[in-house]
Image (cartoon, rainbow, N blue to C red):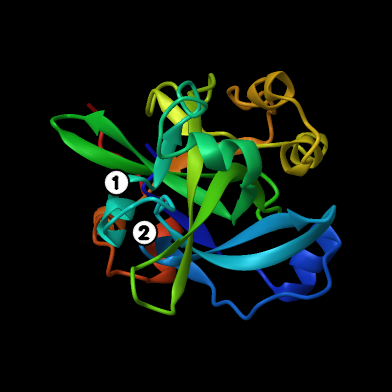
Amino acid sequence: MCGRFTLFTSKDWVREQFGIDKLPDFTNQFNIAPSQMVLAIVAVDNQWHVVLFRWGLIPFWATDKKIGNKFANARSETVTVKPAFRRSFQSKRCLMLMSGFFEWQQRLGMKQPYYIESVKRDELLTVAALWDSWQAPGEEDVIQSCCLLTTSANEMMRPIHDRMPVILTEKEQQAWLNCNSSINELTSLLVPYAGTDLHCYPVSTKVNNSRYQGVDTINPIQLQSD
């Protein structure tokens, strides 16, 4: 499960990396948790758009928005059949943007957080995700929400955790957002990241508190010997 991540970048960098001109306002965040707003890319008529979604998918059929608290992640192995995700998988796919993400390793009877990012710190990670729209009965407001997809850990992640987000390359991003991609093409993308351009390091347990937003959540720390 991926329960926290960061996003610190600029509009100019997002424009350069993805070729999208119009962007919503967003702030740099160093401890994004479920229920907070996240930056995502959707395709409309083959045109990419950057939008803000609430993190934690609320299926269109839900009777209570609180269900989104359970759906920050979706396991890629079952996403085509689970009622909460299968409709979005077919027609409401998106990309979640992040600078890096946190994962916790069981160590010496405690959970030690690690931070995972590109070796090129400016380069954003692009994660396969789903979105949906939800409206409470009798209310005008529509909530657009999303969840990220997870898969088995790759070699780098395995010592830390057995799961990781589905990170997509530039070519894979195109296929994921293409409305003409087949189910087989889409599911073939949901695999552990094969690139060698990620690295990880231990960080402070300050990140455990979702209210803590200090820049130092991503500062490396020295672990004590076992």
Between 50 and 16, which is closer to the camera in this rendering? 50
Disc 2 target residue: 33
Q: Is residue 126 left or right of residue 201?
A: right
Can residue 204 be spotted in the picture? no
Q: Is residue 137 left or right of residue 191?
A: left
Q: Is residue 113 left or right of residue 178?
A: left
Residue 176 position within the rendered picture, expressed as x and y whole percent measured from the top left: 72, 38
Compute the Cα span from label 2 to label 1.
Answer: 12 Å
Disc 1 target residue: 70
Q: Secondary structure at mark 1?
A: helix
Q: What's under tag 1, amino acid-wise?
A: Lys
Residue 201 position within the rendered picture, expressed as x and y whole percent measured from the top left: 45, 41
Instruction: Using the rendered view, name the quadrant where residue 218 is placed.
Output: bottom left
Residue 35 position within the rendered picture, expressed as x and y whole percent measured from the top left: 36, 63
Residue shown at 36% from the left, 47% from the top: 3
Q: Is residue 214 left or right of residue 185?
A: left
Residue 143 position within the rendered picture, expressed as x and y whole percent measured from the top left: 45, 68
Give the quadrant of the N terminus: top left
Instruction: Using the rendered view, name the quadrant where residue 8 is placed.
Output: bottom right
Q: What's under tag 2, amino acid-wise?
A: Ala
Q: Secondary structure at mark 2?
A: loop
User: Is residue 199 depicted above or below 46 in this figure?
Assistant: above
Residue shown at 62% from the left, 36% from the top: 90
Eye-nearest disc, 2 or 1: 1
Give the quadrant of the C terminus: top left
Label 1, residues with CA under 10 Å away: few <14, some 14-19, many ≥20: few
